[in-house]
Image: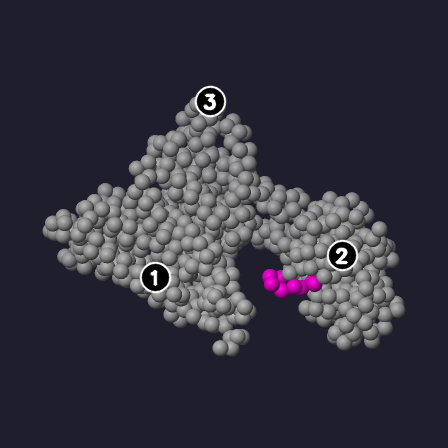
Amino acid sequence: MSLLSVEDLVVRHGLLQAVRGVSFSVERGETLALVGANGAGKTTLLRAIAGAHQAASGRVVFDGADLSGVPSHERVRKGVALVPEGRRLFVQMTVEENLLLGRTAGRRGDWSVERVLETFPNLKPRRHAKAGHLSGGEQQATAIGRALMSNPDLLLLDEVSLGLSPLVVDRVYASLQGLISSGTTIILVEQDLNRALSVSNKVICMLEGRIALAGDSKNASRDEVTKAYFGLHRKAAGGVPA
Amino acid sequence: MSAASPVIERGTAASRIAGCGVAIIILLLALAPQFLSAGAVDRMTALFIYVILAAMWNALAGFGGLVSVGQQVFFGLGAYFAIRLANAGLNPFVSLFVSAVIVGAVSWPISLFMLRLRNGEFAIGMWVIAALTHLLVNLDRLIQGETGTSLISLNVYDASTRRLTIYWLALASMTALLAVLFGLLRGSTGAAIRAIRDNEDAAASIGVRVTGTKRLLFVLAAFGIGVAGALWLATSITFQPKTYFSVQWTAYMIFIVLVGGIGTFEGAILGALIFFLIETWFGGTGVWYLIGLGATALIFSLLLPRGLWGTLEERFGWRLLSVGYRVRLPVNASDTTGGTASPAQVTTSREKA
Amino acid sequence: MTNQIVQGILLGGYYALIACGLSFMFSVMRIINLAHGSLAVLSAFALWLLASRFHIPPFLGLAIVLPLMAVIGWALQRFLLERSARGGALLPILTTFGLAIVIDNVLFEQFGADTRSLAPFIGNLSYDSWEWPGSLYVGKLAVIIFVAAVVLLGGLQLFLTRTGLGRSIRATSEDPDTAGLVGVDVRRANAIAAAIAMVTVGLAGAFLGMRATFDPYAGATQLLFAFEAAVIGGAGSLWGTLIGGIVLALAQTLGAKVHPQGFLIGGHVAFLIVLFIRLYTSGLGLRGLLRFSTGKVP
């Protein structure tokens, strides 16, 4: 059984259909990269899985349970954690307090404040600093750490490299590599195609709310994905669910 | 006719008929005292004052997005200044309107200050202003604290002249204030007002003068409520600060507008009529009447926040006194045979209040 | 003179008590509860009823009334505020105003227009005083109220910073959407915050009844006091509320010295002056006058 399966999902923003009938599934331990141009519906899709948007139709099934109508905090309890676009830290709270909030859902597991600080050593001296006073890289590390503190079965990462310097992005991805090899299931939205393909084992390219291309990251040619990205490649790969 | 071009129109056939209807109603109301008992004339005067209060509170809250629970300050000041002016020797009837002008002028500096507060802070800040003004008026020797005083100079007129004059003044004030508000909402200010009502920040970003427009509504509301306070003083003669500066007045305004339909021009009038009838029938039940008013306001705000008129308007596409524009989207040729668009196909610039 | 200042500071404790629930609710839910004062008076009447009819002394009665207030707060949030807040920022003002009218008039219907006090039920505590150096006489009750305010504010601060539930409430107040995404049940956090706020209101109502008199329509005045103290205290921390309460009380004391009817005027004027200064020094159109930071550092 797949850890996550998304079935014919439609999400609306007002009258606008941001996600229009998307289906795919993710197995345990997989890393799926969602790529696509701005406005392709990647963030909306991720947020719909996390419960921040309600689906207009279709289903999200996680670990065998239909998540329709389940509020976001319940989904965290079931093991879905989102690192939202723009980090969205609680800026008036300290790093430690932000991390501790991740424990609210009460899921047991290996993650602790100490382990997050081990994983992201740059946070160690900032433990009691207000999140609002952190650098971009430190904020991103805190946001990922906060999600990890809920010991998720599925980690959703939305544009973790946005607004960070290349050096910092390298460091963030180095930490992610550790998570991936430890078997955490991840869906990540990433603008940088090379990075997305190198870190993932599956890739889905979205275009105007639909899946334009889905396949293996190793086999997908960069050229093919780029074409799908700009809509030159509509359904060439059949848009088959990965 | 090109099938693709939408038709832009102001009002509907119904709204044109309504326009004529309004003129006839006003004429009938002006003649009504001939056929009414003295008591009925007094009640009608009260109704006109309620309509003014409701329309002015609605102008502020429904169109300006400024919910105030301190509007009694202008009601009380309207009466107070009238007392003061009449005491200084001005004709009492003239005093009523000069007083309202002063209230409008006083509201200007208050607006400079209060309009920088938002939502609940504005609401309760106005209440503080009302409480402070009440206390300060109490300090006036002429008023003698809570004992109060009377508009004695009105006694030179005999009772029936007084009653009729006040009736006509109230009717004329109501008509004029509603006309001003209507004109304001239809004109270019109206477009700004609706933009602010729908989304204040967006309106500001496209260059709508948000503060200026709000200030205009604030001063208009203060003036109108000042007129209402002065007229109320004329009907009851006595002035007790506690009565006039009571938050009850704002409670009435809120009840009327919530029930009638906040942000709709007609709603305030409909609400005032309903309030008038409820008061006539249940006013004697004292405290239960007030509990009923509060509970009704509570229930409307929870379950029917658009009020009666807003709900009817939405459901049936009604628009009698049209303050907005409506765009009729072209419909399929097969659908246009009837020549009328169903309400579902009519979108107007109005949105939620 | 010193005596009056000390009395004023102690009275400030009461204002801080009544204000902290108002600003706490505003910080978390962005709602100003116009029924705040009426609910405090409701609590006072409940204690009065328990004392006069069932001979339960007010301090014992709190054990019944405070849990009841918590339930009222929870229900208020779940059934009224949550629903009306969905209709925008203006609707909750109208909803809570309607609620205030209902509470006031139901109290009037039940208890009539007489002014009541809890003072007769707390024995000599209502008039006993301690003599402090410099021949200062301070009322025991006033000191108890002040200490209660300090303990309550400190306890609330500790709760918000040291407990998981407190952190959840702070997260909800900062960004409810994201709070949900990290696993906070936002509806529950709001309902608990409302319950806590109402417990503080209940306590304030009890002290109102003990130190003074009240009648069914006393709620409006208490609401204004709470609002003024909270705004004067400003956007600091919970402790700002205490400062706000003290400033309000001292201004009232000063007002009463200037003119026999100046007590309330002094408070209102102080409020307007502080508001004026804050409006013109902050420069920004004040978006959250009442909002306090719940963080450790102001």
At x 65% / y 52%, what residue is drawn?
C179
Based on the picture, tell me whether residue A16 belongs to the magenta stretch.
yes
Q: Nearer the viewer, mark 1 or mark 3?
A: 1
The percent position of residue C198, horizontal first and vertical second, equals 52, 40
Which one is closest to the eye, mark 2 or mark 3?
2
Q: Quadrant of residue B209?
A: bottom left
Pointers 2 and 3 in contact (C-beta within 8 Å): no
The amino acid type found where label 2 is placed reads Val
The boundaries of the magenta stretch are: A13-20
Helix, strand or loop status at disc 1: helix
* Dot 3 amino acid type: Phe
Looking at the image, the residue that sits furthest to the right is A219
Q: Which residue is mark 3?
A: C54
C1 or A151, nearer to the observer: A151
Rendered residue at 51%/54% (across/down) = C88
In the picture, the disc for residue A6 is 2
Q: What's the residue type where badge 1 is placed?
A: Ala
Question: In the visual, does B169 lie left or right of B245?
Answer: left
Question: Could you tell me how far apart the alpha carbons at marks 1 and 3 are, in whole angstroms?
Answer: 63 Å
- Crowd band around label 1 with a 10 angstrom C-alpha radius: few (<14), some (14–19), many (20+): some
